[in-house]
C-alpha cells in the first residue's frame, strides 16, 4: 500500500477526475491518494466519481487558499 499526492491545482473539470482515474487504474487496492484541486466543482465531482467507481472518498476539505484536499482509497 502506498500514499500518493496528485497536485491538480489549476486544472478545470473534467481534467482532475480524468488524471485521478488514470492514476487509480495503475494503483493497487488500498492505495491512498491525496488530490489537491482548485476547481470549485471538485468536491462534488469526486464524491460522485467515488460512488460510481467503488473507490472510497475518505476526506474532502476546503482550505482558505482555495485548494480542496480530497483523500481517496483505491478499491
Image (cartoon, helix red, strand yellow):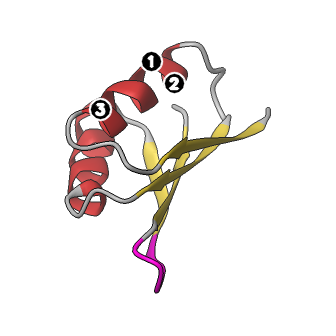
> Which residue lies at the image location 41% right of the left edge and 27% below the top edge?
19
What element does badge 2 sit on? helix
**Label whose residue precedes the other's in the sequence (2 or 3):** 3
Determine the residue located farthest toward the front in the rendered image.
10
> Which residue lies at the image location 20% right of the left edge and 41% below the top edge?
13
> Which residue lies at the image location 53% right of the left edge and 22% below the top edge?
23
What element does badge 3 sit on? helix
What element does badge 1 sit on? helix
- 5 versus 17 height, above or below: below
State if disc 1 and disc 2 touch (CB < 8 Å). Answer: yes
Residue 24, numbered label: 2
Which residue lies under the disc numbered 3? 15
Callout in the foreground (3, 1): 3
Indicate whether residue 57 is drawn in magenta: no
Q: Residues within 10 Å of mark 1 (few under 14, many from 20)?
A: few
Q: Position of residue 28 (x, y in %)?
A: 66, 21
Magenta residues, dominant SS class: loop
Which residue lies under the disc numbered 1? 22
Q: Which residues are magenta?
A: 61-66
Name which quarter of the figure residue 55 lies in.
Answer: top left
Callout in the foreground (2, 3): 3
Amino acid at each position: 500500500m502506498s500514499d500518493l499526492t496528485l497536485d491538480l491545482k489549476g486544472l478545470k473539470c473534467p481534467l482532475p477526475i480524468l488524471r485521478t482515474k488514470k492514476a487509480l487504474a495503475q494503483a493497487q487496492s488500498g492505495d491512498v491518494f491525496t488530490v489537491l484541486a482548485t476547481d470549485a466543482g471538485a468536491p462534488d465531482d469526486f464524491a460522485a466519481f467515488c460512488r460510481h467507481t467503488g473507490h472510497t472518498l475518505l476526506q474532502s476539505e476546503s482550505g482558505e487558499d482555495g485548494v480542496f484536499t480530497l483523500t481517496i482509497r483505491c478499491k
